[in-house]
Image: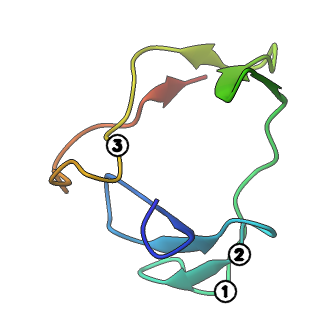
Amino acid sequence: MRDGELVCANHGAYFAADSGRCTFGPCEGAYLTDLEITVSDGDVYLTDADYEFVGPGPLESDDLDRASTSNVEF
């Protein structure tokens, strides 16, 4: 997250948290695919049967590595 928007660790694109719309980057104007999640005690869990969690992404305070790979595989 940066300035209230989701940031793609691969391409540096920005997405509106409420709609998933790309507001900046190579996908500007496109939308993220909906995923099923569960929030429990402030933690977010991927519960979509079509996807598999493979590792945590960077935190807001981390330096973003634009060359990293996706944290979700399907």
**Residue occupying the point 53% across, 77% down:** 27
First in sequence: mark 1 vs mark 3: 1
Q: Secondary structure at mark 3?
A: loop
Q: Is residue 54 above or below residue 34?
A: above
The label shown at residue 68 is: none
The answer to whether residue 15 is left or right of residue 2 is right
Which of the 4 quarters of the picture holds residue 5? Answer: bottom right
Total numbered labels: 3
**Residue occupying the point 31% across, 40% down:** 58
Kindly check if marks 1 and 3 are in contact, taking CB atoms under 8 A apart as contact.
no
How far from the left and from the top, in percent, is residue 25? 42, 81
Q: Residues within 10 Å of mark 1 (few under 14, many from 20)?
A: few
The label shown at residue 29 is: 1
The label shown at residue 59 is: 3
The answer to whether residue 61 is left or right of residue 70 is left
Q: In whole angstroms, how far apart are the C-alphas of marks 1 and 2?
A: 6 Å
Q: Nearer the viewer, mark 1 or mark 2?
A: 2
Q: Amino acid at mark 3?
A: Leu
Q: Amino acid at mark 1?
A: Gly
Residue under pointer 2? 21
Q: Residues within 10 Å of mark 2 (few under 14, many from 20)?
A: some
